[in-house]
Amino acid sequence: MGVPDFILLGFGSVALTYTDRQFILLMWAEDYQPVLGVVLLVAGIVRAKKAAQAQPAPVTQEPGR
């Protein structure tokens, strides 16, 4: 699962807690909602920030060298 997947599942599971619908992937955790959704959302945001920091800066060359 990628970073956007965690954010989507987290936000979606929190939002869907207040309806009669839920993600099939998270049906087993119905008793733990919306807490599990918040945890997934925070984990996705943390992973996104770490992934953004881990990318190296692009190498640029000056023309004519």
Image (cartoon, helix red, strand yellow):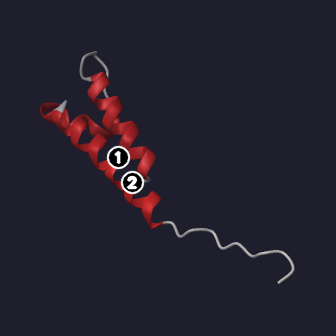
Q: Is 1 above or below relative to 15?
A: below
Q: Which residue is the site of mark 2?
A: 49
At which x and y percent is residue 19? Answer: 28, 15
Res. 29 image quadrant: top left
Q: Is 32 above or below relative to 21?
A: below
25 on left or right of 34: right
58 on left or right of 22: right
| Amino acid at pointer 1 | Ile
Q: How crowded is the residue under tag 1: few (<14 C-alpha within 10 Å), some, or many (20+)?
A: some
Residue 23 visible at all: no
Identified at 77% across, 75% down, the residue is: 62
Which quadrant of the figure contains the C terminus?
bottom right
* Residues at marks 2 and 1 touching, judged by CB atoms closer than 8 Å: yes
At which x and y percent is residue 16? Answer: 30, 23
Q: Which residue is the site of mark 1?
A: 45
Which residue is outermost to the bottom? 65
Identified at 30% across, 40% down, the residue is: 41
| Amino acid at pointer 2 | Lys
Which residue is outermost to the right? 64
